[in-house]
Structure formats: structure tokens, C-alpha cells
Image (spheres, rainbow, N blue to C red):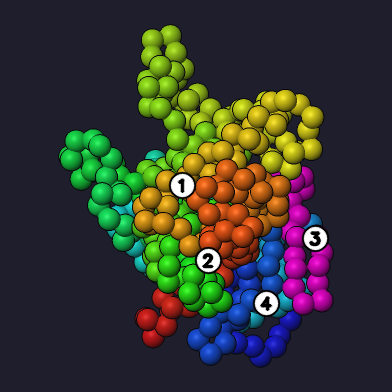
Amino acid sequence: MSRTMPMEILALNAGSSSIKLGLFEARDGRAVRRAKAALDLKGQPPALRLEAEGIADTIEIGVADAGDLRAVLDGCLRVLDDRLGLDGLALAGHRVVHGGEAFTAPVRITGEVQAQLEALVPLAPLHQPPALRLIEALGALRPGIVQTASFDTAFHAGQADRVRRFALPRALHDRGIKRYGFHGLSYRFIADALHRDHPELAAGRVVVAHLGSGASLCALKGGASVETTMGFSALDGVPMATRPGALDAGVLLHLLGPDGMEVAEVEDLLYHRAGLLGLSGISGDTRDLLASAAPAAAEAVEIFAFRIAQAVAALAVALGGLDALVFTAGIGEHQPEIRDRICGHLGWLGVAPDGPVTVLVIPTDEEQVVADEALRVRAAES
């Protein structure tokens, strides 16, 4: 398909079992969305869900092995080219979960940058590898495309030292054992949306609850991150679909003790078998739990809501009060019963229908942030 068009930007958001893609056009220095797509790598065979003007379809990409990421990405690009045209594709931005101390702003991806990101894999073993594999695959398929990386940790890099330090020997902090925070691209989008649509709230004290299969909360003051629930890793904070959230370190010592579990077993437990799935023994999906009559399912939902409410209160301490509570991401946006249960614990804090705390639901868009940042990186090099 051949046509004259502005430069196009592909935003890629790699998960452990899925890929989200956004296709954008550069218009007057802004990234304007043309389409969004998602690929479930657990599906057999993998199929791309595509939404664009006049298109809402699920399309098989012609790849049998979902583990062959280069073939999967090639299939996605062929579908996008066939349905939408990719003649103007010159730029691709990637969501990368961990930027460590070195990356506190988006960067162009080079061989040196890739090596530095590989070194951070032990800090984010579930999320970092898929992003790196996607970067390598796109580089092989479209070597002429400029690739950039946007980091979830970057949004929290300006937090005070009292927030980032653990009560551990200072030498460990100097080696990188500190609180980094995650979901930063989502929080960046919400902060910008508040600034645009609710400037008075944006200037004040806001807690944002990013609630999906991965979940965290962030305290914003004047649009900047001052505290967040995730720390050194994406295991910390509130319970999630399959991750436990905050956990007494003594539990790990016990599990790893004599006649205990191997490190790999504990890692699998913490990333894949804990959280709502572990609590309920049924599912890590709150939709399944809400629909279940099992007592363990109800208990899991109550613990989830209670821990999130506790986190809101703790973040209000960091802010010195609370002006607004914002829900976002899959659960936060689409499950009012969960929102109501959380708010039900917070009436004393002013989170009530006639209370002083404003409660909002704002859909997040991490791919938009990735595309915007990719465009800024390219513009800075021009």
C-alpha cells in the first residue's frame, strides 16, 4: 500500500504474555493515535485485536509458535501494513519497566543502551526480558527504524532520599538496593490528564491507584511523584493478581531455610502463584472472584480492597492530606464494585459522596506516553 503520509510511530508495550501496540502519526510535533492493537501470546494461534477508524477486528497473524517473537512481531507488522499501511513508519518507542539509576528520561536505543538494560534484568525478571526481546526482534525486522525506550521507573526518580532508602547499610543503597517505583508511564499520563482537565486538582495532593493484574499506587503533589507503593521490585506494595505485594522478609528467610524451597521455586511462587490467585485458590482475576460464591474468593477481594485503602491512607501521610483519588487501569477503570469497596474504607479520610476528596476514574494510555516521548527524543536529535 503506497500513500503519502506523515511520519508514523509505533509504540510497543511488552508484557510477559501479551503485547500492546499503538500506531501514531506525527502531526505538528505531537503523536496522534491512528490505531491500537493487542496480541495475547497465550492464544493458539496468536491473533491481533485491532481497533482503528472503521476497523474493529481480531486477525490471525499466521504464526503457530507464540514463543517465536520475531515471527510474531513480523506477523503483526504485516497485518498493520495490510490494513493501515506502514510506509511512513520511521520511529518505534518501547515501554521498558526498569531504567535503574542510569535512565531517568527516554533515550534512543543503541547497542550500549541495550547492554545496560540487559544488566537490569535481575531487578525486573518478569518484565524486562520481553521488552528486550521485542527491541531485538524489531531491530532485525526493520533495521532502519529509530528505536527509543521509555522507563516506568523514570517518573519516580525525583523522589526524596527519605522515600527511596531502605533501612539497610548505606553501602547496599550505593549498590542500587533502593526503592525505584513502577507504572511510571501510566502515572505520567494521569498527571498530564489532570493538568489538562482538572488543573486545580493537579496542583494539589492526589493519590492515583493503577489497578490491573499488576497494581500500585502513587502520591502526586503538583503532578510530581513523591511516594509510591512499589519499591525495589514489582513484587512490592498491594496484593496483585499473582504477586503478594508487601511481604515480611522473615517469610522469605523461612521459605529459603534448611529443607525449604529453592530460590527458583520462591521466585515462581512470588511472581506466579501468590496474590489473589494464592489467596483464593481460584483465579487472579477480580472478575472471576466477584462472580464466585466461594468464601475464599470473597476473602481475596476484601483483602485486596483493604490493602489498597491502607495504601491510600499511607500515601496521604506523604502528601500531608488528600484532595483527590484517581482510579485507572483495567480494574480501576472498569470495576465499580472494587472501587466502592476501597472507598468504603476511606470515609474517615473524606472519600465519600459528599466528602471533600474528589474521586475520579481516568483511563490511562501508556502507549501514548511512549509515542510522545519517542517523538521528543527524535526531535532533540534533529
Tell me the SS state at disc 4: strand
From the viewer's perspective, is the residue at label 2 or at label 1 nearer? Answer: 1
In percent of width and height, residue 172 lies at 22, 39
What is the spatial separation of the Cα atoms under label 3 and label 2, in whole angstroms? 31 Å
Q: Are marks 1 and 3 in contact (CB under 8 Å)?
A: no
From the viewer's perspective, is the residue at label 4 or at label 2 nearer? Answer: 2
In percent of width and height, residue 189 lies at 52, 67
Task: Please provide the residue range marked out in magenta.
Answer: 40-58
Q: Residue flagged by tag 4: what amino acid is it?
A: Arg
Report which residue position mark 4 lands on: 34
What is the spatial separation of the Cα atoms under label 1 and label 3, in whole angstroms? 45 Å
Q: N-terminal of the two: label 1 or label 3? A: 3
Report which residue position mark 3 lands on: 59
What is the spatial separation of the Cα atoms under label 1 and label 4, in whole angstroms? 39 Å
- Label 3 crowding class (10 Å Cα cut-off): few <14, some 14-19, many 20+? some
Which quadrant is home to the C terminus?
bottom left
Report which residue position mark 2 lands on: 190
Report which residue position mark 1 lands on: 313
Q: Residue flagged by tag 3: what amino acid is it?
A: Ile
Tell me the SS state at disc 3: strand
Q: Nearer the viewer, residue 224 or 39?
A: 224
